Image (cartoon, rainbow, N blue to C red):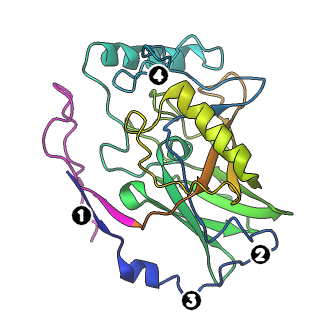
Amino acid sequence: MKRQVTFLTIFAAGFLTVPVFAADGASGITGVRWGKNTFYFEPMPSGPQPLRNLIRRPNGTGNVNQLVGDYRNPILKPEAAAVVKQKGELAIAGKGFVNAQEQCRPIQPPYAFAMQLGFQMLPKNDGNITIIYGNNNNVRQIRMNDSHPTKLVPSPMGDSIGHWEGDMLVIDTIGVRTDSFTSADRFGTPQSEAMHVTEHYRLIDGTLAKAAQEKAEKSEGAVGNGARVSGVDPDTTRNGLQLELTMEDPNVFTAPLTVLVTYRPLMVEWQEDICADNPVEYYKDQYVGLPKADHPDF
């Protein structure tokens, strides 16, 4: 069960003394609340394409009530295609399939960039960046100008390091721990612990950002069947933010997959989004049970 209240003031207050801009190029990217209205990746003009929903509504958008990913997409290796096909069959049968978000688990990269509708980058006094997301109040820590540890222990959000290339923020993530709920997109595309995610964030013209978001919504549908629930600022004189995201997983993809995600500034207040473990079946005959520890932590 979920409930929403005003975002914890104590949590927010911890960042109020942090400078809004902490590095060359940070101005305009950090400190702004960014958002979108779709749960899908935008395709690049050419090259490998992200999965699309095979089930379309009469208006041509994807049917959010039946998430049937195109398992025939050549970006998928045969084993991954079989997983997507099987999950699509569940969706067609009305059973659906479980994922990290609905089970209140961390919404990990790259799935986070499809599902998270709002986020904010908060620079810290030590030069690093904390990213907070609206869904489930997930948090990522980005170590700036650092390197991945030689012996990396996989974790739910992986290990993320970043740096600035002029006015572009680059984040490199490896070591995402996987389980039966982990997926790379909304269609249940699997990922392995070999997944390597690279994010390139840059500001773009507000009019171009608006056009990109509307194109994505027209193609795949918007959250709430068209309702603009994320509170996007309609002022196109404000810059948008575009993420160029590259996913590399040799156990899943036949080649690196690069996609786009376009954001615009948000106007709505931060909300606390609490996701509680669900002790009952989310889908019929697919009860997954609550997480439990087989051994005490202390």
Residue 129 pos. (x, y %)? 63, 70
Q: Is residue 39 left or right of residue 224?
A: right
For marks 1 and 4, the one nearer the N-term is 4
Front: mark 2 or 1: 2
Element at badge 3?
loop
Mark 2 neighbour density, 10 Å: few (under 14) some (14–19) many (20 or more): some
For marks 2 and 4, the one nearer the N-term is 2
Residue extending farthest to the right is: 166
Q: Is residue 289 magenta?
A: yes
Mark 1 neighbour density, 10 Å: few (under 14) some (14–19) many (20 or more): few
Q: Is residue 48 left or right of residue 105?
A: right
What kind of residue is marked 3? Answer: Thr
For marks 3 and 1, the one nearer the N-term is 3
Tally of numbered discs: 4
Residue 180 pos. (x, y %)? 37, 35
**Residue that carries the numbered disc 4 in the rendered image:** 62
Element at badge 4?
loop
Mark 3 neighbour density, 10 Å: few (under 14) some (14–19) many (20 or more): few
**Residue that carries the numbered disc 3 in the rendered image:** 17
What kind of residue is marked 1? Answer: Pro
What kind of residue is marked 4? Answer: Gly
Residue 78 pos. (x, y %)? 56, 13
Gap between marks 2 and 1 measured at Cα: 42 Å
Residue extending farthest to the left is: 280
Q: Which mark is residue 296?
A: 1
